[in-house]
Image (spheres, helix red, strand yellow):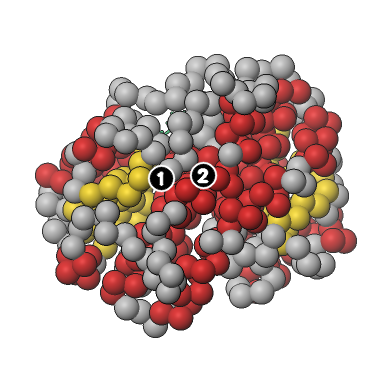
C-alpha cells in the first residue's frame, strides 16, 4: 500500500503533482474563469463580506497564513489568520458579513471545530477547506471546498498542505472574480498559471537528490533556522515545523526582516540557515532585501541553504547550497518552495533513525481541545 516507497510520507510527497491537479480539476472553465458552484454561499452574500477570518492548526494554519496574502491582494478584503486554539477565547469580533474559513485535512480537529462553532453562533458564515468527505468540520459549516489530495496517512502533512494552498488560491481568486477588483486581469492570468503548477511541482521533485544528500550531511546538527519574506515567511514556518515533527531538531522560522531585531544573535559558525527567496521579478524590493539578509548571515558564518527561482543569479555568490524552483507568480511560489523543505525534513528524519510516518508524541488528527 506504500506503492513501493519506504514510507507513506515519501509516497505522499511524490503524489503532490496529482493532488494539485485533482484539486484544480473541474474548477476552471475553458475561458479561464473559476467555477466554484459547489461553494454554496451565494455570490450576493460573498459580495457583502467585509472581513475574512481563517482558523486552523499546525500545517493547515501555515496554509492560512499564505492565504491571507492572496485574499488581501486579490480581493482587497481584510483577512486575519488565527490559530484555532486561540480564536474563541479572545472574544473575536464577528458578524454576518464575516466569512470564516476553517482549514483542516482531517475535518475532525477539535480546536478548529470549536472555533467554527463559535463563529457560527456569532452569525458568521463558515467555509470549510477540507480533505475528508463527510467529516465533522464540513458537516457543521455553511459550505465546503474539498481538497482532493486523497487519503494522507503520514502524520506530517505534505500533499494535503499543497492542496490546501490550491483551495485557498481558488477561494481568493473566486472572491476577486465575484466582487470585481482592479486585479481582474491578474486574476485571469493567475487562474491560467495555476494549471501549470502540477508540472512545476513535478519538476521540483525531479531535482531533489542534492537536497537529500545535504540533509544526510546535516543529521548531527542541533539547530536549523528558516528565513522567508512575504509568502516565503509561512513557508519558512512550515519548513521549521516539518523538521521539528520529523527530525526532532530545534528549528525556527523567522520573517527575514526580523533578523536584525533579534534572531541574528543566534547565527554562529556553520549554523544551517534555509532562506526562501522571493522572485526577483514582481516584488523585486523584497528580493533585494532578502539577498542582503543572506549576505549578512553568511558574513557571520552561517551555512546558507538558498531556495531561489531558476534564473535568479543574484543569490549565487552567497549560497553555500542552492536549490532551484521553477518560475511562478509571486503568490504561488509556496507550491514549489515547500517541496524541498518536505524532502529535507523527511531525509533528515531517516538519517537520524526516526520513525517518519509516526513521529513520537504526535497524532494525525487531534480530537481533543
Ligand atoms: C495535527 C497534525 O496535530 O493536526 C498536523 O499532527 C496537522 O500534521 C494538524 O497539521 C491539523 O490537522 P487538520 O486535520 O485539522 O489539518
Q: Residue furthest front?
A: 30
Mark 2 and mark 1 residues within 8 Å of each other at the beta carbon: yes
- Quarter where residue 358 is shown: top right
> The C terminus lies in which quarter of the figure?
top left
Q: Quick one: label 1, few (<14), some, or many (20+) residues within 10 Å?
A: many
Q: Is residue 257 visible?
A: yes
Q: Position of residue 118 (x, y in %)?
A: 18, 41
Mark 1 lies on residue: 147
Q: Position of residue 102 (x, y in %)?
A: 31, 45
Kindly identify the residue that appears in the image at 82 percent across and 41 percent down: 210
Q: Position of residue 219 (x, y in %)?
A: 77, 27
Kindly identify the residue that appears in the image at 47 percent across and 40 percent down: 149
Q: CA distance from mark 2 to mark 1?
A: 8 Å
- SS at mark 1 in the image: loop
Mark 2 lies on residue: 19
> Mark 2 CB in 8 Å range of ligand 1?
no
Q: Front-most of 273 and 5?
A: 5
Question: Would residue 126 be found to the left or right of residue 22 on screen?
Answer: left
Question: Would residue 278 be found to the left or right of residue 100 on screen?
Answer: right
Q: Position of residue 326 (x, y in %)?
A: 69, 60
Q: Quick one: label 2, few (<14), some, or many (20+) residues within 10 Å?
A: many
Q: Front-most of 126 and 191?
A: 191
Amino acid at each position: 500500500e506504500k506503492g513501493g516507497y519506504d514510507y507513506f510520507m515519501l509516497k505522499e510527497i511524490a503524489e503532490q503533482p496529482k493532488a494539485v491537479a485533482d484539486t484544480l480539476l473541474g474548477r476552471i472553465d475553458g475561458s479561464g474563469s473559476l467555477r466554484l458552484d459547489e461553494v454554496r454561499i451565494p455570490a450576493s452574500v460573498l459580495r457583502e463580506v467585509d472581513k475574512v477570518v481563517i482558523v486552523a492548526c499546525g500545517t493547515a494554519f501555515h496554509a492560512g497564513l499564505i492565504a491571507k496574502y492572496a485574499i488581501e491582494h486579490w480581493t482587497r478584503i481584510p483577512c486575519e489568520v488565527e490559530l484555532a486554539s486561540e480564536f474563541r477565547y479572545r472574544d473575536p469580533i464577528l458578524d454576518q458579513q464575516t466569512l470564516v474559513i476553517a482549514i483542516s485535512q482531517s475535518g475532525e480537529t477539535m480546536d478548529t471545530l470549536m472555533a467554527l462553532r463559535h463563529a457560527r453562533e456569532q452569525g458568521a458564515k463558515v467555509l470549510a477547506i477540507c480533505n475528508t468527505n463527510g467529516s465533522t468540520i464540513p458537516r457543521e459549516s455553511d459550505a465546503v471546498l474539498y481538497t482532493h489530495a486523497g487519503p494522507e496517512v503520514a502524520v506530517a502533512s505534505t500533499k494535503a498542505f499543497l492542496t490546501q494552498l490550491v483551495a485557498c488560491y481558488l477561494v481568493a481568486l473566486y472572491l476577486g472574480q465575484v466582487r470585481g477588483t482592479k486585479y481582474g486581469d491578474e486574476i485571469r492570468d493567475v487562474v491560467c498559471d495555476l494549471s501549470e503548477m502540477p508540472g512545476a511541482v513535478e519538476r521540483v521533485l525531479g531535482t531533489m537528490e542534492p537536497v537529500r544528500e545535504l540533509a544526510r550531511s546535516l543529521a548531527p546538527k542541533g539547530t536549523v533556522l528558516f528565513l522567508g519574506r512575504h509568502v516565503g515567511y509561512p513557508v519558512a514556518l512550515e519548513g521549521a515545523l516539518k523538521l521539528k515533527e520529523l527530525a526532532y531538531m530545534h528549528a525556527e522560522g523567522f520573517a527575514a526582516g526580523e533578523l536584525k531585531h533579534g534572531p541574528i544573535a543566534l547565527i554562529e559558525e556553520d549554523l544551517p540557515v534555509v532562506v526562501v527567496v522571493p522572485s526577483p521579478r514582481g516584488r523585486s524590493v523584497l528580493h533585494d532585501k532578502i539577498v542582503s539578509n543572506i549576505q549578512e548571515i553568511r558574513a557571520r558564518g552561517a551555512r546558507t541553504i538558498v531556495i531561489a527561482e531558476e534564473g535568479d543569479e543574484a543569490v549565487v555568490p552567497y549560497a553555500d547550497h542552492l536549490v532551484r524552483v521553477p518560475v511562478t507568480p509571486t503568490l504561488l511560489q509556496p507550491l514549489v518552495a515547500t517541496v524541498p523543505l518536505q524532502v529535507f525534513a523527511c531525509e533528515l528524519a531517516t538519517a537520524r533513525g526516526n520513525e517518519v510516518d509516526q513521529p513520537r508524541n504526535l497524532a494525525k488528527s487531534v480530537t481533543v481541545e
